[in-house]
Image (cartoon, rainbow, N blue to C red):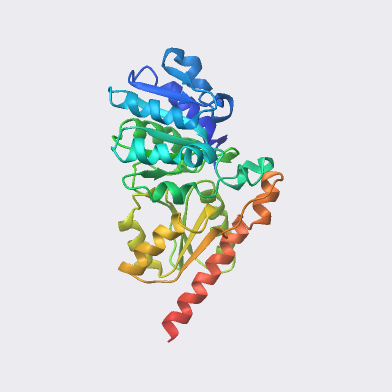
């Protein structure tokens, strides 16, 4: 594993790095440039940076209008606000007309830590995924985020991308020839007994969980599913057929997000045991991020336990 960097910081730096390459790129902020890290773009290209103040709905509406003039707007705020407070504008002003606006939600999930339940957005995957025509992304590390930013700039249509607050280890840079592609997951580790499909910082946890499982004689495949919608159906089906059991892992409510997307697909196409790992339909709480994650079982050990459950279900299924 490589450098530790928060995906929000990698995002801000990636925007600044491509500012000159894409003159149509414009960035909107809601008085949070120092938190979402859009400050890097602001410094590099102040004439294409717009701070709208604490007015998320207005920000999305203005960005929608500018997109009709050939600009490529990226709108930024905390996930709780860009996905939550501005949901109506995202739905009606961006997705309904299919406009080319990218909605960025920083500080997603429980790892916001001390900000507590009101700011720990665990619903964003579900509420963004349910909007028709919306693409939903959550890169797992800085290297993947760099590629995701440019992929989004070149993608024509509405999209939501979650950023994380905590610095996380870089893992995708170790994959030979790695290339980010919207809608295509990637196998980071092969395995034969169970597949762990993870998103965001849970990808790193899944890799550690695979090591724990190996010590117990269980071979776990690990998939980085950075795009929740559109889901990589081909890869999910391949993993289900080859390993016979699936665990999904996300720093989000287990209702409506990655786990739901995978379960919906497999229940219709190729039923195998699916065990969802994430926040069990409850609000977060305030505390140091590692302690909060531990309290909710969002850990490598938590994933490993779910994998053992999935393997046991597979054995019971085939013994009937």
28 vs 20: above or below: below
**Is residue 173 visible to us here?**
no
Q: Quadrant of the N terminus?
A: top right
Residue 144 picture location, percent across and down: 44, 38
Which sits in the foreground, 6 or 112?
Answer: 112
50 vs 195: above or below: above
Query: Residue drawn at (40%, 60%), measured in percent from left and top?
Result: 262
Which sits in the foreground, 209 or 2?
Answer: 209
Residue 261 picture location, percent across and down: 40, 58
Residue 81 picture location, percent across and down: 52, 37
Q: How many marks?
A: 0
Residue 208 picture location, percent across and down: 57, 54
111 vs 150: above or below: below
Residue farthest toward the top in the current orientation of the protein: 47
Residue farthest toward the bottom in the current orientation of the protein: 320
Q: On the rendered structure, is 87 left or right of 67? A: right
Q: On the rendered structure, is 65 left or right of 167? A: left
Query: Residue drawn at (56%, 52%), measured in percent from left and top?
Result: 205
Query: Residue drawn at (44%, 85%), measured in percent from left and top?
Result: 319
71 vs 124: above or below: above
Query: Residue drawn at (43%, 58%), measured in percent from left and top?
Result: 190
Which sits in the foreground, 179 or 43?
Answer: 43
**Is residue 209 visible to us here?**
yes
């Amino acid at each position: 594993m490589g450098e530790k960097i928060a995906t929000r910081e990698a995002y801000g730096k990636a925007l600044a790095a491509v500012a000159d390459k894409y003159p149509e790129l414009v960035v909107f902020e809601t008085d949070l440039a120092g938190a979402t890290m859009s400050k890097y773009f602001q410094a590099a290209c102040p004439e294409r940076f717009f701070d709208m103040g604490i007015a998320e709905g207005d920000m999305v509406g203005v960005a929608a209008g500018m997109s009709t003039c050939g600009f490529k707007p990226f709108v930024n705020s905390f996930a709780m606000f860009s996905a939550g407070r501005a949901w109506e504008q995202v739905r009606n002003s961006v997705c309904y007309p299919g406009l080319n606006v990218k909605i960025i939600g920083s500080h997603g999930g429980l790892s916001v830590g001390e900000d507590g339940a009101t700011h720990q957005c665990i619903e964003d995957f579900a509420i963004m995924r349910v909007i028709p025509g919306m693409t939903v992304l959550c890169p797992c590390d800085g290297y993947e985020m760099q590629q995701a930013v440019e992929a989004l700039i070149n993608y024509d249509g509405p999209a939501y991308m979650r950023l994380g607050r905590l610095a996380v280890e870089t893992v995708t840079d170790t994959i030979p020839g790695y290339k980010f592609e919207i809608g295509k997951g990637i196998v980071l580790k092969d395995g034969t007994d169970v597949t762990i499909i993870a998103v965001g910082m849970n990808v790193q946890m899944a890799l550690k969980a695979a090591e724990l499982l190996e010590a117990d004689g269980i071979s776990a495949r690990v998939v980085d599913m950075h795009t929740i919608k559109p889901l990589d159906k081909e890869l999910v089906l391949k993993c289900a057929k080859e390993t016979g059991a699936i665990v999904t892992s996300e720093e989000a409510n287990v209702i409506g997000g990655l786990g739901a997307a995978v379960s919906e697909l497999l229940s219709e196409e190729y039923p195998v045991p699916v065990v969802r790992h994430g926040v069990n339909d409850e609000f977060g709480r305030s505390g140091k991020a590692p302690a909060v994650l531990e309290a909710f079982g969002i850990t490598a050990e938590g994933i490993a336990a779910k994998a053992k459950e999935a393997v046991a279900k597979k054995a019971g299924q085939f013994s009937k």
